[in-house]
């Protein structure tokens, strides 16, 4: 098991990007079910206080990332600037995409009530959303969904990890939206 753990560590570290468990299992000539406990043990090893990185699980993939508390010293020497802050408009658009995915730009604009071109373009630029297909409708509009970078940035393992909205709060939001939208006579 130690050799399998070390080999999996080498693969994930060397690739840099998220590596699916099936790819790791194929490389190690084992079954994914046999590899899962090994990867969980490896992730636990990296949670020690003495480590500057950790192994994260993203849906069915694994990746090494810098621990948040060491991000500041890292950016002092890195050539890339700190991750851009998301404006309220961009966050609102991202929330719509995260909860309604896959969703078209038209559906986003219908929910927001304003053009969302800039916000959608920013989210694509930041790598938080991507094109996930096309709607089978006239014009074949692009469908958007969240990315693994979205999961990483917001500390989630999968889309199913999104917080559930309080039903009372959801009804309050719907009522507020109905008051804001003029009703045709």
Image (tube, helix red, strand yellow):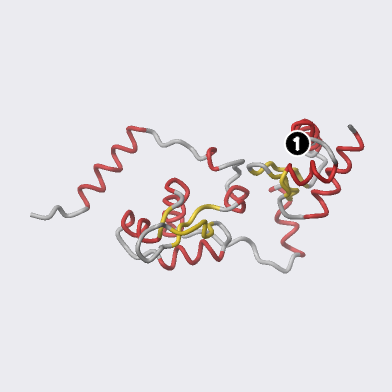
The residue that mark 1 highlights is 32
Q: Quadrant of the C terminus?
A: bottom left
Q: Nearer the viewer, residue 81 or 38?
A: 38
Residue 141 quadrant:
bottom left
Residue drawn at point x = 47 percent, y = 48 percent: 98
Judged from the image, the secondary structure of the residue bearing numbered disc 1 is: helix
- Left or right: residue 115 versus residue 65 is left
Q: Position of residue 113 (x, y in %)?
A: 29, 59
As drawn, which residue projects farthest toward the left?
A: 185
Work out whether 44 lies above or below 9. Answer: above
Q: Relative to 154, is 78 on the left or the right? A: right
Residue 116 rendering spot, x and y as whole percentages: 39, 64
The quarter of the displayed image where residue 106 is located: bottom left
Who's the residue at 73% across and 54% down the image?
17
Residue 72 placed where, x, y %?
Answer: 70, 56
Residue 179 percent across, percent down from the top left? 20, 48
Q: Give the residue at x 35% y 63%.
A: 138
Q: Looking at the rendering, which quadrant does residue 80 occupy?
A: bottom right
Neighbourhood count class around disc 1 (C-alpha, 10 Å): few under 14, some 14–19, many 20 upward:
some
Is 128 located above or below residue 165 in the figure?
below
Q: Residue furthest right?
A: 3
Question: What residue sits 75% from the left and 44% below the top?
Answer: 54
């Amino acid at each position: 098991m130690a050799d399998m753990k070390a080999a999996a560590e080498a693969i994930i570290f060397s690739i840099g990007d998220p590596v699916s468990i099936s790819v790791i299992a194929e490389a190690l000539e084992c079954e994914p079910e046999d590899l899962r406990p090994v990867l969980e043990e490896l992730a636990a090893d990296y949670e020690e206080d003495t480590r500057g990185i950790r192994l994260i699980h993203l849906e069915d993939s694994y990746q090494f990332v810098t621990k948040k508390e060491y991000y500041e010293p890292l950016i002092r020497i890195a050539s890339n600037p700190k991750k851009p802050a998301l404006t309220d408009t961009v966050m609102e658009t991202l929330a719509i995409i995260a909860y309604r995915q896959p969703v078209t730009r038209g559906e986003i604009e219908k929910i927001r009530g304003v053009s969302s071109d800039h916000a959608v373009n920013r989210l694509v630029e930041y790598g938080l959303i991507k094109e996930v297909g096309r709607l089978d409708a006239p014009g074949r509009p692009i469908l958007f969904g969240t990315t693994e970078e979205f999961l990483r940035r917001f500390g989630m393992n999968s889309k199913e990890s999104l917080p559930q909205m309080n039903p009372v709060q959801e009804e309050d939001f719907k009522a507020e939206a109905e008051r804001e939208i003029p009703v045709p006579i």
